[in-house]
Image (tube, rainbow, N blue to C red):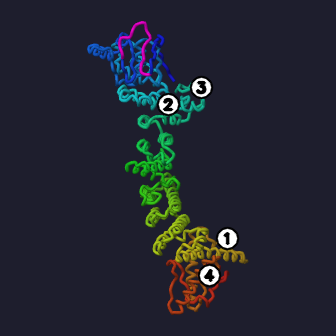
């Protein structure tokens, strides 16, 4: 910290109580200056020789027949006036970053210019500010903080602007030339606070060395400093974002009660609006999605304006794929909307999907490597958002006030490509059914129709077959597709056994038995389709022969739990009664479910053709 001493005479000011100050001298005082609540008993000559303002005031008081002068609007008050008075007497005065701005404003008020005397107080303070204060990182920040209590004088004297420009310029200095910032030094116990030219190989400060120091500024001054830093054009958006995040952490309270308290509500609202206004212009970089979502949460709690929320939502939509479920648990603004603001999250997802769709428009035609990398990134981000939505739905499904329509709207907001597996959606639906036991049959059918049983994993399918909350229709669909997945594996095993049984040498190096094993998922899909068609043909033959149990025997191959067995026993018994009445019908499952046999207890399933015949039939 820089200091400057003025004058050489010893300090002769003394106090007589809290409100009286006088100068110890052989000469009697001849003027009294009332500054606020403090009265100074002084001599006219030292004061009038350096201050034009005091000359006029004393002359006016003399004309009125009094020796008392009143000053009520002096910047800095009585303490600052004492500094100016001591300078007039030639007594020792110490100027520092803490009092230099007040002394400068008071000297300006008292008109202590060069016209009165060479080397007057204004001149000396300006030399100190320009040669020492503005060259020091620490002192510039201290002086800038002190200017707020001295407005508008500090603004008119351009002290604020000069400090801001000095601070903004220093943040752009090469870190190799920065010894360290003063807040870091205070933690490390060091004493070096200057920005100096590097003479050797000192430890290089990090690029964000200035971030923590600026957090000490009030929000209005911080805003102006950050504007100055951004105007230099030398700071990366990522570093600007880190600085804003550090400032928000420094000043935003952790507790909800402190955040929304009446004493600090307005301050917190102004703080959030300032940070959002200072965000980098590049909406896809600079600040993490988690930080932006926290700002959005605070903006909602403190009643930020709609333009603030709109700006945050626009930025969040660019990197929604980086968010977590916890980040999205934003509080609802209205008690009727439940605990969480699901509608706002739905809006974010819609914005993300719309932006992704626009970026994909015509993109698949181009074959350049850069375009393909961009498309792959978009696909990965879309998948991430799909997982995020399913996880969010699972979390908010336990809210009893969450409406079914809002759940369905959010679940269907993402494209099908974003949800290749429906496990997450299935568990979210199950959580909603568990919490909302009063759903009618139509609502259960509506929410369960979101789940595509063909996209459930084996574990989720097993869970669904044992889930009492699911409609019977959905359970039947799950069981059917379990069988459909299991059947190709059985046939592949038979084919593999037949390949080992072949003893005739093959001229073709590619064994026909090996060619039957699918090498690609598409071929496996074709085999599943072929198997399904063949099963339908077997069912038709069984019905023609009066068979009764072909489909039931195939389902019997699955390891069903007790509830699943009861379901099918009930289905088969009801089907038997239906056929006895002379009319055939299908199950209550989806249109993809297989037709049930009219008499499922008489005819055995048709056996598969011998392996050898099948092998030669395709050779």
Q: Of the residues under marks 3 and 1, which one precedes in the sequence?
A: 3
**According to the image, label 3 marks what residue?**
200
Q: Nearer the viewer, residue 465 or 5?
A: 5
Looking at the rendered structure, the secondary structure element under dot 3 is loop
| Percent coordinates x, y for residue 525 in the rendering | 56, 72
Looking at the rendered structure, the secondary structure element under dot 2 is loop
| Percent coordinates x, y for residue 34 in the rendering | 36, 20
Q: Give the range drawn in magenta.
A: 18-32
Q: Which of the numbered marks, if any, corresponds to residue 554?
A: 4
Looking at the rendered structure, the secondary structure element under dot 4 is helix
Q: Of the residues under marks 1 and 4, which one precedes in the sequence?
A: 1
* Residue 28 within the magenta-colored segment of the rendering: yes
CA gap between label 2 and label 4 equals: 77 Å
CA gap between label 3 and label 2 equals: 17 Å
CA gap between label 4 and label 3 equals: 83 Å
CA gap between label 3 and label 1 equals: 73 Å
Q: Of the residues under marks 2 and 4, which one precedes in the sequence?
A: 2
Q: Is the magenta stretch mostly helix, strand or loop?
A: loop
**According to the image, label 2 marks what residue?**
173
Q: Which of the numbered marks, if any, corresponds to residue 482?
A: none
Q: Nearer the viewer, mark 1 or mark 4?
A: 4
Q: Which of marks 4 and 3 is in front?
A: 4
Q: Which of the numbered marks, if any, corresponds to residue 509?
A: 1
Q: In this view, does 525 lie above or below 581?
A: above
| Percent coordinates x, y for residue 491 in the rendering | 64, 76
Q: Are marks 1 and 2 in contact (CB under 8 Å)?
A: no
Q: Of the residues under marks 3 and 2, which one precedes in the sequence?
A: 2
Q: Which of 124 and 387 is in front in this view?
A: 124
**In terms of image quadrants, where is residue 605?**
bottom right
| Percent coordinates x, y for residue 242 in the rendering | 50, 41
Callout 2 crowding tier (Cα within 10 Å): few <14, some 14–19, many ≥20: some
């Amino acid at each position: 910290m820089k200091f400057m001493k003025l004058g050489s005479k010893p300090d002769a000011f003394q106090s007589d109580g809290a409100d009286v100050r006088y100068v110890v001298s052989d000469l009697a005082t001849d003027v009294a200056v009332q500054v606020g609540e403090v009265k100074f008993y002084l001599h006219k000559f030292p004061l009038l020789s350096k201050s034009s303002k005091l000359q006029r005031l004393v002359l006016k008081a003399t004309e009125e027949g009094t020796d008392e002068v009143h000053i009520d609007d002096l910047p800095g008050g009585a303490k600052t006036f004492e500094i100016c008075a001591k300078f007039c007497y030639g007594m020792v005065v110490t100027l520092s970053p803490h009092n230099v701005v007040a002394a400068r404003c008071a000297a300006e008020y008292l008109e202590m210019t060069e016209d009165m005397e060479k080397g007057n107080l204004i001149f000396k303070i300006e030399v100190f500010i320009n040669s020492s204060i503005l060259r020091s990182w620490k002192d510039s920040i201290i002086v800038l903080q002190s200017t707020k209590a001295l407005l508008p004088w500090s603004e008119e004297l351009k002290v604020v602007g000069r400090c801001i420009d000095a601070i903004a310029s220093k943040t752009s200095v090469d870190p190799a030339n920065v010894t360290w910032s003063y807040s870091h030094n205070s933690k490390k116990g060091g004493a070096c606070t200057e920005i100096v030219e590097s003479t050797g190989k000192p430890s290089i400060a990090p690029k964000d060395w200035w971030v923590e120091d600026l957090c000490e500024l009030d929000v209005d001054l911080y805003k102006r400093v950050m504007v100055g830093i951004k105007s230099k054009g030398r700071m990366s958006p990522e570093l600007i974002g880190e600085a804003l995040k550090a400032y928000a952490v420094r000043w935003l309270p952790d507790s909800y009660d402190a955040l929304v308290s009446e004493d600090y509500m307005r301050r917190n609202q102004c703080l959030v609006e300032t940070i959002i206004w200072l965000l980098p212009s590049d909406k896809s970089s600079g600040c993490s999605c988690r930080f932006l979502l926290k700002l959005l949460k605070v903006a909602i709690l403190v009643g930020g304006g709609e333009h603030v929320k709109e700006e945050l939502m626009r930025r969040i939509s660019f990197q929604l794929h980086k968010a977590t479920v916890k980040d999205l648990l934003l509080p609802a603004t209205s008690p009727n909307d439940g605990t969480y603001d699901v509608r706002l999250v739905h809006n974010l997802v819609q914005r993300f999907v719309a932006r992704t769709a626009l970026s994909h428009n015509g993109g698949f035609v181009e074959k350049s490597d850069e375009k393909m990398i961009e498309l792959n990134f978009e696909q990965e981000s879309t998948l991430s958002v799909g997982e995020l939505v399913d996880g969010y739905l699972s979390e908010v499904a336990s809210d009893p006030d969450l409406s079914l329509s809002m759940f369905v709207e959010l679940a269907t907001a993402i494209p099908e490509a974003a949800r290749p597996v429906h496990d997450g959606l299935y568990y979210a639906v199950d959580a909603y059914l568990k919490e909302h036991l009063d759903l009618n049959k139509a609502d259960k059918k509506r929410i369960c129709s979101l789940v595509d049983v063909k996209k459930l994993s084996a574990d989720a399918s097993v869970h669904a077959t044992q889930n009492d909350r699911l409609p019977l229709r959905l359970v039947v669909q799950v069981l059917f597709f379990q069988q459909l997945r299991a059947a190709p594996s059985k046939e592949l095993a038979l084919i593999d056994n037949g390949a080992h049984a072949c003893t005739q040498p093959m001229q073709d190096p590619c064994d026909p038995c090996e060619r039957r094993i699918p090498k690609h998922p598409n071929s496996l899909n074709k085999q599943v389709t072929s198997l399904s068609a063949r099963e339908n043909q077997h069912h038709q033959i069984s019905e023609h022969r009066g068979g009764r149990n072909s489909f039931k025997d195939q389902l019997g191959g699955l390891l069903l739990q007790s509830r699943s067995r009861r379901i099918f026993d009930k289905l088969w018994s009801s089907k038997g009664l239906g056929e006895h009445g002379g009319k055939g019908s299908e199950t209550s499952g989806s249109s993809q479910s297989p037709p049930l046999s009219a008499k499922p207890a008489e005819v055995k399933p048709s056996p598969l053709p011998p392996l050898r015949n099948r092998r030669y039939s395709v050779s």
